[in-house]
Amino acid sequence: MDSLDTLQPKKTLSQHAMTVALLMTGVGILVNLVFYITELDIEALTNPAVSWLNRLLLIGSSYYFIHAALKSHRDEDLGGYVSVGQGIGMGTLAGLVSGVLSAIWFFIFTTFIATDMLDKIKEVTVQQMQEKGGQSAEQVEKAMEMMSFFFNPVFFAMVIVLSSIFFGFLCGLVAGLALKKDKPYM
């Protein structure tokens, strides 16, 4: 081993996960702003193709960052070996941190930038209930009263955090399976 190798600090899985979380959050904010500026955010509520485009961009970039960080961690810090569990750990931790940061962003976004976002979501929901469900205006109003909790920033923040953890876990699992390399037994 070269003496220069011992001078370079090894990064921990947590450090890699934090970097991934920042990248995931940055891409999420960028996609959110682009969709908002181009008015695709409301289009995504009614158009499945636009909705799937949004999901593919976010999940695809998340997987890419988790895969790249896990590969880097395996090759540079772990001597070329990594387990599926380490992939799951990196993905889940990155998802948790990214989810919390994204929830904070959502609160800032809906409070200061797109102050009418939640109202637009409610309007689209009411319209869909009337069109697809064939419900009367009174039935829709009662349903919306019962669902009012689901249209506040706290609920959306919880959904953002939980879905980010879930998709981070899945991306970490797939990356761990793809990059798994066990240490040989002696």
Image: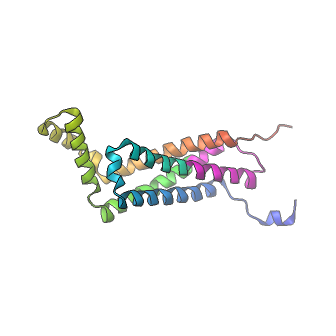
Q: Nearer the viewer, residue 167 or 10?
A: 167
Q: For this view, does 125 lie left or right of residue 161?
A: left
Across and down, in percent, residue 63 comes to 57, 47
Q: Nearer the viewer, residue 86 or 172?
A: 172
Residue 110 falls in image quadrant:
bottom left
Q: Is residue 65 magenta?
A: yes
Helix, strand or loop for the magenta stretch, by majority: helix
Position above or below: 19 against 137:
below
Report the span colored magenta.
63-91
Q: Residue at left 62%, top 58%?
A: 15
Q: Nearer the viewer, residue 44 or 175?
A: 44
Q: Is residue 18 visible?
A: yes
Q: For this view, does 160 lie left or right of residue 13?
A: left
Q: Residue at left 43%, top 44%?
A: 52
Q: Is residue 57 magenta?
A: no
Q: Residue at left 29%, top 45%?
A: 150
